[in-house]
Structure formats: structure tokens, C-alpha cells
Amino acid sequence: MNEQQDLHPMRHSLAHVTAAAVQRLWPDVKFGVGPVVENGYYYDIDLGPDRKISEEDFGRIEDEMQKIISENQAFERLEMPVDEAIEWAQNADQPYKQELLNDLKRSGTTVAKDLDASELGTIADGDAQIENVSFYRNGDFTDLCRGPHVESTGKVGAFKLLRIAGAYWRGKDTNPQMQRLYGVAFANPKELRKHLELLEEAKKRDHRKLGQELDLFVFSDLVGPGLPLFTPRGTVLREEIGQFSQELQSAAGYERVSIPHIAKVDLYKTSGHFDKYPERFTVTSFESDAEFMMKPMNCPHHTQIYASRPRSYRDLPIRYMENTIVYRDEKAGELHGLSRVRGATQDDAHVFCRVDQIEDEFTSIMTMIKDMYAVFGLKWRARLSFRDDSDKYLGDPELWQQAQETIEGIAKKLELDYFVGEGEAAFYGPKIDIMATDALGREWQLATEQLDFLQPERFNLEYTAEDGSAQRPVMIHKALLGSLERFLSVYIEHTGGRFPVWMAPEQIRLISVNQEDETVAFAAKVLERGRDLGLRITVDNSNESVGKKIRAAEVMKVPYTLVIGQKEIESGEVVPRIRKDIEVQPEHSAMGIEEFLKSVSNEVKSRTSKTSL
RNA sequence: GCCACCUUAGCUCAGUUGGUUAGAGCAUCGGUUUUGUAAACCGAGGGUCGUCGGUUCGAAUCCGACAGGUGGCUCCA
């Protein structure tokens, strides 16, 4: 990350150059903040209600930026007392800057309680005694800024304006919306080009594109946004990963349960979810009956299975698991392929246990997660999602503190690569979230395990202790995959659609050299044998050239392709065509058909297929 | 939900400043060919240009609303 630090002053300087260019083109522009972000920078601007920048304007802005760069203006630092600065902002008609300065004067920081300091990036040392603030000036553009900058506008490296987007002032949706102008910037044109190529590569791997190309899932305007429909191929993927998750859990003592997809609103009033998010529930009703709603989570249902009979301390832990869909009212603008949907399938489980069992249960879950992600070949780190000081959390703070310590202890014991995410906890308890990194280095939250003291309380769950007293169990929520849809979106992009053999919708494709009876019959025999072994095998007998049929199989990223013709019929041997990423033994020339099918079958059973991505 | 942009055949895309019956490749279907490891050849079908409304002698093209999507913002139990 050294490189990132080196690039920081130059990227930040480019933010100023961008702002200066915008100001030359639209002199009444009002500026927000312009920090450095990953791979570049942005600047928030407001041209007023009647004028908005669109991507068509990028050419003009970039031209103007080039001019400023070739003028090689020096970046000059100046300091002035806060009051003078406020006056400056007022005279310059920069109300957003004025607001920042007022905050700075009042509290020594521009960081609103819910505003991320690093995003602001411009000013503030967080010292309430602040007297002077710093400005940077280049040419006729002056900006409130902490720096540092490069010497002059001639030294800003290679850049490109990338996109324009709406962004609320200070990140609050009740504030006016500004326009955020994003640029990417690198030390030289070569680095910039490399980054742009990476973006192109990401586009090729986009799970929405691959989902279409590989025929995995579709959306329908009639069904509705955020409601993916899985094709037969996509359903194979869902079921394979869902089954994998359930196998791991069965081995760890989890039992499967089943619940309906709607429930009385009372269930969620009791759990506390309804009062927490009243506007987000879709209520329906049956004739002359109570109000019902689609389930946005499964825990309240599961508590009712637990509560259905008296429990002894000897019964605990009780562990319920289920792969099932939850329905959430995600806003239209928040939907995104499979990563953000309105009907998400969770590999959900709830453990009811005694306080003294928390550590073992958490450890066992983390072990499952480790095993699972090793098989998928995903890199990950753990985020310990703890509470902050705000009042949105329910339950005894002391219990919280204790639980957070336990969790951090487990992370240490298991030597996890972890970090603490303050303010990331659920309102009912702290959690560990697994942040997985895909092939392009992007991080996604997948697995989660959460401690919950609240719901056992709200549902009055009990067990009888050794001494005959009634005790309250603790609840643990967990999902290994998280949402199957989200997981698939990451995994499709991670693999670029080249799934390991055990998951592949189509594992073997047979290609007939011609359409003569003998060839077709032989291919049918191989097909049948493959199916007997439980393999997903198909045959392409179509009246096309072998070359074309090979290509078709390649395009669909089928792991193994067998060409069936006279040679194979006579020898009973095949030379499997193996997808390039699959690591195989050096000797893979001719082998007996039966031998080949059995080796694939073993590979599938052990989920061992190694791919080099 | 908010801001900007996008929507032409199943898919990927052409379509000059508004001007007759809207094009291509792939895919599909029919025929020829009987094919040996990434695209054989010939032919055919397929689109009320997202929907509705407006401007105009005339709209795929201009304007508006709605729907769906893209990139962000906000949100994510």
C-alpha cells in the first residue's frame, strides 16, 4: 500500500485541479468536499437546480484540466484564523465550505457524528482549540484544505474522469443532493491504462453478464425487480452450494427444520423487528383473520420450535438449520443483480445454548466457515462487528461488553485475520462477519455469526437448569454462505464462470463426430453410464462440425469434453479435453472411458477439483 | 427512494441533420454436407424500435410521463 500513499498528494491535487476546471466552466459552482478514494478521487459539486453535469461534459472538463496542468500552477499553502475563513467562504458564496468551517470553529472537527472522517479528508485535527485553518491556492482557485499537495499542477500524473453520480451532502438523505465527479489517477499513463484494463476485465466477469451468457438466471418484468428466476443450470449451482453448507452443518450436529414463508405480524412485534423497521414490512391479510407478512428473517419462527416444549440443560445446544428465502423491501435503486435482491435464500441456522457453551459454538461455526471457504478457494478476513456509543442497540451494555470480549478471544485463539468494525453490530448483539475477497480484490460480506441476547428475552425462552431453576438460553444466528444469491454473485465473478467440477451445471459433454447410427448409439451408452455414476453429462449429436461443437462447449465453460467417433468406439478409450484452468495429472492422454468417468465421479464426490484462477 | 445516463430481433450491436417497405453477425428453423478438438455451405422465419401520450404533413430519431436497467448516494434486521 506504499504506492497508495505516494499517490495520495497527487490524487488530492487532481481533485483541486478538477474543481478549478469546473469553476472556470461554471463560475457559480458550490463546492462540497474532494477527498482521495481508492484508485483516484472525487469532488462534490453543486451547479444549482437548473444545471447538472453529465458525462457529455467530461471532454470539456478534461480539456480545461489539461490547460491548468500545462500552466503548471504552484500549490501554495496559506493559513488564516477561522473567523476570517468563514468570512472568505461567505464572500466567495461557498455555503458548504462555510458550514464545514462553522463546524470546525464550534467543535474543532468537520466530522459530523455520522460522517466518516477519512472521507472528508480535507481538514481537521479533531482539536477543539483550533484557531487557524489552512488553505491551498493554485492559480485563481483557493480551497479549504489540510493538504498535502504536490508542488504544482504540472506534477499530477495520469488521470481520467470516470463517472458522475448523485451524492447527498454529508451523506444524509435529508440534505441536498450534490453531484459527485469521480476520477481515477495514477503515476503515469501506463499505470492508468493497466487500471482501465482491469475495469474491462471486471466487466467481462460481471455475474449479470455471465448469468446471461451461461444461462444461470433471469429476471422478468412481470415477476418484478430483485426477484431472480434460476434456470436449470443456475439451480444446480444453488443446490450444490446449499447442500455443501448443509452437509457441514449436519456433521456439526445441526438439524433441519422447515417453516412457512409468512407469519402473523404479532410474531415480529414480539421479536422487536416490527417496531425497529415498521415501514419496511409488507402486510397482507387473510379473510377475517389477523394480519400476516412475508418473513424478512427466520429467527422468530425458529424460536417457536424451541418454545414448543420444555427444554432441559441437557438438550442444549439445540441447533436448527434451513435453507430458505427471506423477503426484504430493498429500495429499487439498491437492487443489483444477485448481490442485492428482494428474495434472498439464506443458509440460516439458530443455535440455542447456555452462556457457557457460547465459546464452543462460536468456535465450531468458525471452523465450518474456514473449511467451506478453503474448498471454494476464497480469501477472507473476519470483521468483528461491535457496537458503538449510539443508542440504537438494545440489551444490557455489560452483557455486550462481555460478549465482545469473548468474540475477540475466539478470533485470537483461532488466529483469524480480523479487524474490529465499530458500529457494525446488529441492534440485538455483536457479530463476526466474513469479508471474502474475489478474484479482482473486491471485498464482500458473506458468512456471518451473531450473538443474540434479545430474542430469547422477548420470546421468553427458557430451559431447566441442573438445580431445577428456569434459565434463559442464548441464541446464535449463523449463515455460512450468507445469501446463496449474494454468494453466487461473488463466486461467479471469482471463477469467471469456470466452476469447479463438483458444482458445474454440466460436467461432461459428449460430442459425436458424425450422426451415423453406430456413433450415436455409442455416445448414448457413455451418456447412460455417466448418469448412472451421478454425473451431469450431456451429448451433442447435432449436425455441425466437430470444431463448432467444441467451441460451443468451450463457450459454456464445460469442464470435460469427449469427442466420440470411430477411434473411441474401436479402442474404448478417450482423450478428454480438459478446461484450461483445471489442474490435472501430467499424464492425461488416452484413458479408458470407464476409468475416466469414475475419476470424474470421485473428483465430484470429494469436491477436490482444483482450478487455477 | 434520490441524481445522471441507458432501452432497436432470443443475444451483441448498426441506423447520417425527423423523410418510403428498420439492417448486420450470432442464435433458431429448413436443406446440402457425414464432419476429428474454438465458428462448413445455401436458404427461411423473427422487430407495432420498452410502454403510453404529445409536437409534426411525417417520429426508432424531438418533448413528457411511466416501466425496466446501468453508475453512484442513502439503506441493508
Image (tube, grey):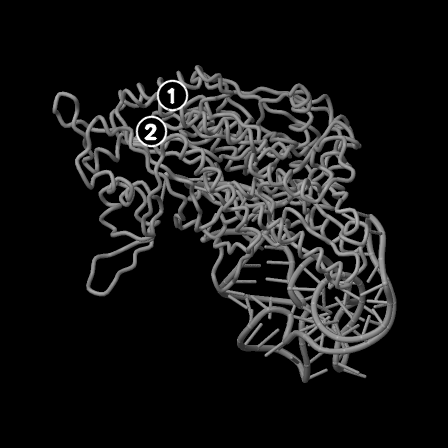
> Is A99 rendered above or below residue B4?
above
Viewer-proximal residue among A175 and A186? A186
Which residue is at a point 75% across and 29% down the rendered structure image?
Answer: A157
Which residue is at a point 53% across and 29% down the rendered structure image?
Answer: A120
Say whether residue A47 is visible: no
Tell me whether circle 2 and circle 1 mark residues in contact (CB < 8 Å): yes
Marks 2 and 1, how far apart at CA:
9 Å
> Is A355 rendered above or below residue A477?
above
Query: Which x, y percent locates residue A215?
Result: 61, 54
> Is A440 rendered above or below residue A283?
above
Chain under numbered label 2: A
Query: Which x, y percent locates residue B43?
Result: 82, 76
Question: What type is the residue that disc 2 sits on?
Answer: Leu
Q: Is residue A96 left or right of residue B71?
A: left
Chain under numbered label 1: A
Which label sits on residue A21? none
Q: Is residue B43 left or right of residue A272?
A: right
- Quadrant of the image occupied by residue A544: bottom right
Query: Which x, y percent locates residue A416?
Result: 49, 20
Please identify the quadrant where the C terminus of chain A is shown. top right
> Is A491 rendered above or below residue A317?
below
Q: Say what secondary structure mark 2 lies in.
A: strand
Query: Which x, y percent locates residue A311?
Result: 19, 33
Question: What type is the residue that disc 1 sits on?
Answer: Ile
Please identify the quadrant where the N terminus of chain A is shown. top right
Q: Which residue is mark 2?
A: A451
Say whether residue A325 is visible: yes
Q: Say what secondary structure mark 1 lies in.
A: helix
Viewer-proximal residue among A108 and A310? A310
Callout 2 and callout 1 share a chain: yes
Q: Which residue is mark 1?
A: A407
